[in-house]
Amino acid sequence: MENFLFQLFIFLAAAAIAVPIAKKFGLGSVLGYLIAGIIIGPFGLSLIADIEEVMHFTEFGVVMMLFLVGLELKPSLLWQMRTPILGMGGVQVVLSSIIIAGISLIFLPWQQAIAIGLTLSLSSTAIVLQTLREKGLMNTSSGRSIFSVLLFQDLAVIPILAVLPFLATIAVHDDGHLESALFDISSLPEYMQIIITLLAILSIFFIGKFASRPVFRTIAATRIREIFVAAALALVVGISLLMTSVGLSPALGTFLAGVVLADSEYRHELESDIEPFKGLLLGVFFISIGASLNFTLIGENIPLIAGLAAALMAFKWLVLEGTGFVFKMAKKERSLFAIALAQGGEFAFVLFQFSRTNGVLPAQTIEPLISAVAISMFLTPLLFLAHEKFGTNGQGDEEAGRDSDTIGRSGHRVILAGFGRLGTDLGRFLISAGIKPVIIDHDAANVDVLRKLGFEVYYGDITRPDLLEAAGAAEAELLIIAIGDIDQSRKLVELAAKHYPHLKIAVSASDRSSAYELMDLGITRIRRETFGSALALGQDALQLLGIEPYEAHRLMRIFRKKDEEMMPELYKMHRKDEDSYISMYQKHNADLEELMTLDLNLDMEEIDKAWNVANPET
């Protein structure tokens, strides 16, 4: 027990130290976990011993991840994705398997070559999905394509596990028990095995669709959250045991359960309860991969293992580029698609171990392959970083290959830069007020959608001097910046101030610190994105608590007036002395609280006049 607690402490402490440092340097959490594993592993500080046992335990993190992925995929959405899943995923797995097996056939028997081809055709669902989520690429077109292939690969594990025993060429000794299942159905007639397997899959559908809802409803009625957490974990563990018992992948079972439960009213509760356990186990899984790198073996066989890792990634990259070309992906979108999936996957550890147990592959063949897979997984976050720095990210793939629109200049008084969540409502307000601005946005997909809705929006990067000129900056009176990215906003302000000093400028800032940066450039008309919404919602809250509507409106206006008066004073102080800034901020808040708790029977007309004089734009 003491040893287990010590090992647990080492894993958690390593994650808590390494990941924040890695994130600080822009490396991402996955690379942080892998580096932490190398440091505490047998070839680092030797703080952990049995890596293989830890990996068996932490593979459950992958199972939980696929359950959560399933929860996000309603059956109708999964059916809509059938073409990319079966098409792109099928082509990638089949071609990768054929090419890798064909090369392996030069050195190994055909049975072993096929086993290696099937195993190495898979990519790392855990690393790739985690990285896509961190970089906000899951909902891009390239992200959806990557996810489709990963989903097919995870499903392909099941037939691969079924095929591998038929490729056995090495005699194995049966030790009389089966560790991976509660009971062994292999001794039953083949038709009975098929029936039991189908019943297991049908039982998952029944549990998810019918049995789980009344159970969760009863548990939810107790209002004891830890019981709901226990039930959610029991569901995942139980399905994993059921799948393992019939010889199927627990990841497939939990994925199917997640899909079935995607329409459940308890979906979000299940996600929030399981997410922390999934994240923790996945983190420890990544650490164990880093710790499993056998540097002694790698050092003795550097040319072999480096060549294997390079060849694996190169051949898979070629297959993925070809797959993207066949399915008419944009050229720069294909680069992210290929980089994301070129590595080996975590299921390689499972399949290689299964191959060894079933006499398909000998240990001397498996060990260098496992090292090559681990190295390829380690390199993947670095390749993402390189692509992000030197290429274009997934969100920009479509934009990168698209030319800016030609803008029809017709004497517009206003240029609106940015037509996202804030710019859309602002544009609608101006148009309704009889002012038609030139609207420019740099999100190609957003532009296409807004045009369908009837808006006249132009695509392009407004921070380019030629596009700003084409938008009519020389004749316009006002430039409104609603971009959201403070660096882009600063660039546009500086460009406009340099070439079009006559332009009045109003800017949206995401927060107070961004507002200060814009004030450094001399901008006086700045609106914080969420400030108005916060005050409007606060006014609603006061009314819901029984305060008279106009009284609530009055308190809101007092707060806005005083906060806007406070901004210039705080701006002058924020760069000079942090302690003085904090002190002034606290004093202003205290004064504001005291003002708003005074007797409200004041001369409203005088307050309104003063408020309007101080803020004529409102």
Image: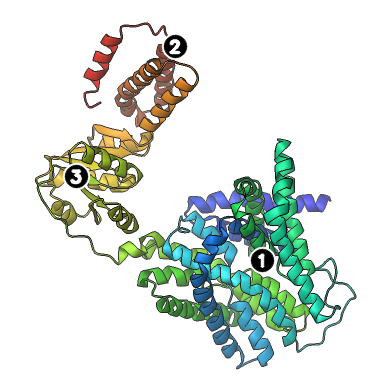
Mark nearer the N terminus (1 vs 2): 1
**Which callout, 3 or 2, points to the residue nearer the camera?**
3
Q: Residue at x 50, y 81 (%)?
A: 315
Kind of element beneath mark 2: loop
Q: Give the residue type at disc 2.
A: Thr
Q: CA distance from mark 1 to mark 3?
A: 52 Å
Q: In this orientation, which residue lies closer to the viewer: 85 or 251?
A: 85
Q: Give the residue type at disc 1.
A: Leu
- Is residue 600 positioned above or below 195 on the image? above
Q: In this orientation, which residue lies closer to the viewer: 20 or 75?
A: 75
Kind of element beneath mark 1: helix
Q: Residue at x 71, y 61 (%)?
A: 204
Q: In this orientation, which residue lies closer to the viewer: 61 or 204?
A: 204
Mark nearer the N terminus (1 vs 3): 1
Q: Which residue is mark 1?
A: 252
Q: Give the residue type at disc 3.
A: Pro
Q: Which residue is mark 2?
A: 597
**435 with respect to 356 (left or right):** left
For the residue carrying disc 3, how many other residues have a C-alpha within 10 Å: few (<14), some (14-19), or many (20+)? many
Q: Position of residue 521 (x, y in %)?
A: 24, 38
Q: Which residue is mark 3?
A: 437
Mark nearer the N terminus (3 vs 2): 3
Q: CA distance from mark 1 to mark 2?
A: 59 Å
Quadrant of residue 576 in the image? top left
